[in-house]
Image (tube, rainbow, N blue to C red):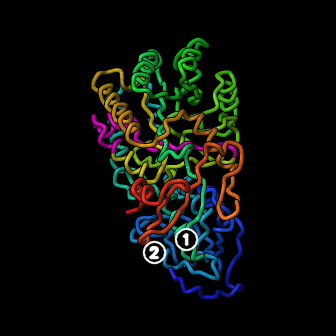
Amino acid sequence: MNLSHKPISQAFAKDQGTLAHSVRNYYRCPDEFLDFRLNEGLSADQGFFQFGPGTTCYGRSLTAAHQTQLKYPLSDLLPSVLVDGGQLVLPFDPDEVIGNLRLERYASVRLHRYEFVFKKIYYWLRPVTNRSLRSYIQKRWAANGEKRQFPKWPVDTTVESICENLLRLSLQARGADRIPFIWFWPDGARGCVSMTHDVETVVGRGFCTQLMDIDDSYGIKASFQIVPEERYPVPAEFLCRLRDRGFEVCVHDLNHDGRLFDERKEFLRRVALINRYGREFGAKGYRSAVLYRKVEWYGDFDFSYDMSFGNVVHLDPQRGGCCTVMPYFIGNILELPLTTTQDYTLFHVLNEHSIDLWKKQIGMILAKNGLVSFIVHPDYITEEKELSVYRDLLAMLAELRKREALWFALPGEIDSWWRARSRMSIVKDNNSWRIVGEGAERAVLAFAKIVDGQLIYEYADAPQGEMAARHSSFVES
């Protein structure tokens, strides 16, 4: 990066007042600390580039600075950032790039068509196949997925890295000591943990009571995603039993046949029923079958939050990944991304029966203070071998809660907090700052600062030495 504050002619720079929108909303910091504009014009087409080592981006950039196909090595545009009087002059639009990652716009049309054909064949054969054959097909499909370099397996935090880089550069450009922001989670929690259970079959529904007992024995509550039609009966007493015990009810597709997004007219018929079941179930949240998603149609859902995007989904039928471990808005819907590997994938595709992968993912997510979210199906842990692994996971999470300041929350609670945080702001209060807005009593003022060239976070109300020790794990290596 050029920190010489070299003046740049306005004739070659493009003003964009919204360039900092995504970064500002990520941190909820005062407007004055983020001042971006584009350097010259952007290319007409979109492509891949880097913004710092290991940070793969997709979008328009300076002419000839990107590649239309993902092929490493990529051009690194971080050194191309210039400074003009405290303003960052950027070689790409961060709002566009972050949106492309979160909404998976980097995936090619050719890839989507290939996945569509695979999905059609798979679901056509599914009724006449057993689990062993389905597992074999999925393993063959996943074989290529494991070789993919982007999104980065097993956790991709590209969005976090972009935001951190831009905040660090803003600190340097302004010569500022620190930038105040609203901490990500209530009461200063280091990160958030959320357990969810997708109930796919009558066997899984029958196991729900026992699963609630198991969760409760470790002090963990979860949401249950219920398929409204065809798979199993859904009596009102069953839903009441879940809610009465402090668990949450969400809608899981319509009939779990994997064809919700195949055709627009049929989708509209189904989504009307899905929305009706949401009202009948008293459900704020939704998740599609097999994590299928088509973001262009999300405006037709009547839910407060969705849980159908994965962080890295190389091994799923619809590949991709949102490349973030934080919630984000898709229009009025809050997306709570799945940030860890599903139990089915772990057991039947990767053929692993330990919590080693989950442990690794948890560490990587919490290093970014993110949302650690799980899908564990009651359908796939009825046997002792799989159930033992799940108990190991719960025991590890319970132990983690004793050692770390983590927020264990239901998806609906996360939705309520993230919406409240999105409406809060930071105002000047004499020589300090304070958070205002509904729910601000649970919000914590934090600061971003640079130590030894690295961006670190610290809470406002803790002694300096204590914070350095307490947040040493927040420092990027």
Query: In this figure, which residue is indicated by the disc labeled 1?
Result: 177
Secondary structure state at the residue bearing disc 1: loop
| Up-down relation of residue 69 to residue 62 (above or below) | above
Q: Is residue 226 above or below residue 184?
A: above
Question: Which mark sits nearer the N-terminus, 1 or 2?
Answer: 2
Are dots 1 and 2 in contact, CB under 8 Å?
no
Q: Nearer the viewer, residue 69 or 363?
A: 363
Residue 162 place in picture, x, y as percent = 52, 63
* Amino acid marked by disc 2: Ser
Across and down, in percent, residue 319 comes to 46, 48
The x, y position of residue 213, in whole percent, is 42, 18
- Mark drawn on residue 75: 2
Q: Which residue is depicted at the point 45% across and 20% down?
A: 212
Residue situated in front as seen by the camera: 398 or 299: 398
Can residue 113 be seen here? The reply is no
296 and 445: which is toward the camera: 445
Boundaries of the magenta span: 332-359
**Residue 90 picture location, percent across and down:** 59, 75
Q: Quadrant of the C terminus?
A: bottom left
Identify the secondary structure beneath mark 2.
loop
- Specify the quadrant of the image occupied by residue 288: top right
> Which residue sits at x=54%, y=57%?
101
**Residue 221: within the magenta?**
no
Residue name at image x 56 percent, y 29 percent: 252
Q: Residue at 37%, 44% (x, y): give it.
A: 141
Labels 1, 2: front one: 1
Around disc 2, counting alpha carbons within 10 Å, would you say few (fewer than 14), some (14 to 19), or many (20 or more)? some
Check disc 1 and give the amino acid type: Asp
Residue 340 shown left or right of residue 262 in the figure: left
